[in-house]
Image (cartoon, grey):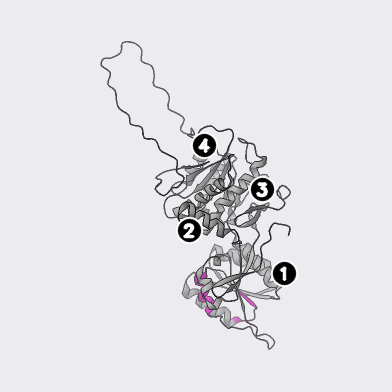
Amino acid sequence: MFDVKGTGNLNRRNLLAAAAMALVAGCAVVPKAPQSGPVAPPPPPPPTNQSDIPVDTERHRVALLVPISGTNSGVGQAIANAANMALLDTGAKNLRVTTYDTTNNPAEAARKAIADGNMLILGPLLSDDIPAVSAIAKAAKIPVISFSNDEQAANRDVFIMGNLPGQSVTRTVQYARSQGITTFAALVPRGDYGDRTSAALLAAVRASNGAVVALEPYERSAASIASAAQRVKAKGGFDALLIADSGSLSVRAATAFKGAAKVTGGTTPTVRLLGTELWSGERDVNATAALSGAWYSTVSDQRFGQFSKSYRARFGTQPFRISTLGYDAVLLTLRVARDWKPGARFPAETLRDTKAFPGGFLGVDGAFRFTRGGLIERALEVREVQTGTVKVVSPAPIKFGE
């Protein structure tokens, strides 16, 4: 069952699974004459945290915390729609998922979710909302599985389910090393994303006995990345260059390296360009000759085509690529629910136990599991950019341990 609840000013016009609202009109009654006998006191008001969800001992109550109004409402609604799809596709009868709008007050959304008896929180989407939600959830001993990719937010009570850029970089480096590439350089944007990708690059190259010979930072603008590309090109001496940005900005940098070569010992091999998960689904990547031959790693699209077709049939629009997180989060919950008694606390520790789920979980985005630290670990594929398309050059493992 799928419910939608709001906190604050919730715009419900676009909700496809909204709960019905009842309108009750009241009137004031004036007594004809004062009563001579004692007057009974009015009934006490209901508790402010009383849930208006009916008592249900057969279903698990799970809260979905996403923005349903405001700037990020499109993404939040898509995740909610996908979660609803998972319930419909599986025919689940033992799960009640209720959506709470985090746009105006994520802490209040968490309070309401807990007051309604939810034993697990899926969300929030935005990393800025995690501290407020996790503080409320931790006090109630309710685990949180966030759709954010903020690795710093992971702890004993918070799991991070969003796609992590460091894992994409690591997978690509491992593949590049298997193809004989030994020296790397990188263009990294200033800020948290650049810090994480550069740290992942250094760790992955070091672990595989390669070498990083240059890291060139830039501001996230076309002019800045183009200038940084010229600077790192002038340094030379590397086999592969990681461009840690979106497709449109990566194209600006790649243009400087079209036909570029690394001069070492009289040989002139072409520099191999590398990307991150940000390239997935971006038209600029496949449409630009300068990126032809580049490698990047991301989740498999093998199941996304059918998911997208089903989503469009149900909701009349193309889903955001990130909406699969809502679908897979419900599949994860249903898998755990096989050994989870309704009304009992969610067995969060089993998510960290590789023995409990040795092959991980399987969703639209492929196999995934959580580390002991609460971070998502995904089975990724490596793609090679070709003119107008991409080719999978190293498929994602079907399950962990392969």
Q: Earlier in the sequence, mark 2 or mark 3?
A: 2
Q: Callout 4 environment at 10 Å: few (<14), some (14 to 19), or many (20+)?
A: many
Tell me the mark number nearer the camera, choosing from 1 and 2. Answer: 2
Question: Mark 1 and mark 2: span between their CA atoms?
Answer: 40 Å
In this rendering, the answer to whether 267 lies above or below 99 is below
**Dot 1 amino acid type:** Ser
- Cα gap from disc 1 to disc 4, whole angstroms: 50 Å
Q: Distance of mark 3 from mark 1, alpha carbons?
A: 29 Å
Q: Is residue 315 visible?
A: yes
Q: Which residue is mark 2?
A: 318
Q: Are marks 1 and 4 in contact (CB under 8 Å)?
A: no
- Disc 4 marks which residue? 116
Mark 2 vs mark 3, CA separation in Å:
31 Å
Q: Which residues are magenta?
A: 235-260
In magenta stretch: residue 397 = no
| Secondary structure of the residue carrying numbered label 3 | helix
Query: Residue 75 location in percent, x, y?
Result: 48, 55
Of the two numbered discs 2 and 4 in the rendering, the one whose residue sits closer to the viewer: 2
Which mark's residue is nearer the viewer, 3 or 1? 3
Identify the image quadrant of the C terminus.
Answer: bottom right
Q: Amino acid at mark 4?
A: Asp
Circle 3 residue: 351
Report the amino acid beneath label 2.
Gln
Badge 2 or badge 4: first in the primary sequence: 4
Compared with residue 312, is residue 136 higher up or lower down, i.e. above or below? above
Q: Residue at x 36, y 15 (%)?
A: 39
Q: Which residue is mark 1?
A: 208
Instruction: Kindly identify which numbered label has been placed on residue 246.
Output: none
Question: Along the polypeptide, which appears first: circle 3 or circle 1?
Answer: 1
Residue 267 place in picture, x, y as percent? 68, 87
